[in-house]
Amino acid sequence: MASSHWNGGVNLQVVEPFFQNNPAFYFLSARRVAAGDANFTVTDIQSQKDVSHDVDVAPEFFLGYVSESGLGFRTRYWFFDQKTKQTTAAPQTSVTDLTLSFPISSAAPIGLDIDTRDNNLRDSMTVETKLNTQIWDGIITKNYEVQNSVIVLGAGARYAYMSQQYNAFETQEPGATLDIRMNPPVPQFITAHKKDLLSGHNFWGWGPVIMIEDTIPLGQSSFSLVGLARGSAVYGPAKQQASKTLLVRGTQNGNEILNENAFVQRKNRHQTVLEIIDAELGIAYNKKWGKGELSGQLSLVAQEWIGGGSASKSATTGAGFGLPGSGMTGAPQVAGVTSESNFGFVGGAFKLGYLY
């Protein structure tokens, strides 16, 4: 193979996203045992269920050139895009049951959340999320032959884009019930009851990227061991917005029209820095093909976005968990705290390239 050459191809990564903290739902297991109006015991246990992601393909396209002096360049484009959907049903209680309250809550982007009602009507919540990430690198490289291996050092610029969505939908079946928030409770017939929470956040930015790659031939064979690591810090604007709506239709006290509507919206924008680290370790095979070489590589791959956040970018629930009359109603003090947690990808890859 000539010392100066072009190299291009595709790297098909099969990866699964993982998150430091990525809540889909919060559940409440609570009970109020009362011996009288002023004598009761309350137990309140909350649990979290995370968003469930699947393995998916994340393609990478690359092109590079190396001169006879070992100086060259590399450019690559990588992206990942996946949607999720999860549904859970709330437990039914008697029409006047005070032993459960708001048994399911969504996450709380910018402090906004929705929850299910606790009564005799069937209620459920669906959460949908989306994760989209893109990376483009332009790197100047230099090859060094060290003993029987080839080390490549490089530095350049990176563009990174990240977008996440978290949407939650609560729907209650129609029917007769009581509004126990009133004293005395008010009989109602619900014809429509739903809450929607729509949210998303994104980031794009530029910054420096550095890389190191080492290729070690395995004996006199056409196989070699290849290790690669890249690190970058990208700076740019980050935006987040969230809104929730409430719609209730029906009648109460027999003939009074019930018509409730509510809308709340919040936005957030700031400048930030994300650190992105990725690595590959695999076995490569090269074979002469025409005027060049055909190369194939099987690798383990990992990537982490430090500060990328979760789908909702919330640290905890903002739900008004608690039991009526317990003094425990109302959102926790840390409700809706914005969380700059990390996420990443792990999996395997098959790289196919051609050197000419």
Image: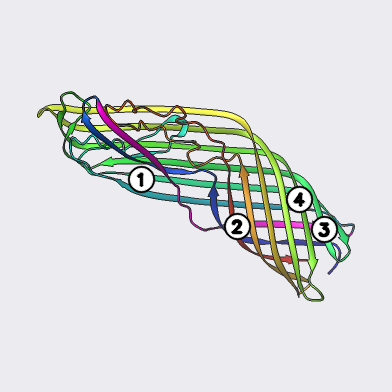
- Give coordinates of residue 294: x percent, y percent: 72, 70
**Amino acid bearing label 1:** Thr
**Disc assigned to residue 59:** 2
- Give coordinates of residue 101: x percent, y percent: 29, 35
Q: How many marks?
A: 4
Q: CA distance from mark 2 to mark 3?
A: 25 Å
Quadrant of res 102: top left
Where the C terminus falls, by quadrant?
Answer: bottom right
**Disc assigned to residue 296:** none
Q: CA distance from mark 2 to mark 4?
A: 19 Å
> What's drawn in magenta, residue-wise?
39-68
Q: CA distance from mark 2 to mark 1?
A: 30 Å
Q: Residue at x 20, y 25 (%)?
A: 182
Q: Is 66 placed left or right of 176 in the picture?
A: right
Between discs 3 and 4, the one toward the N terminus? 3
The residue that label 3 is drawn on is 151
Q: Secondary structure at mark 3?
A: strand
- Give coordinates of residue 234: x percent, y percent: 67, 39
| Residue 40: in magenta span | yes
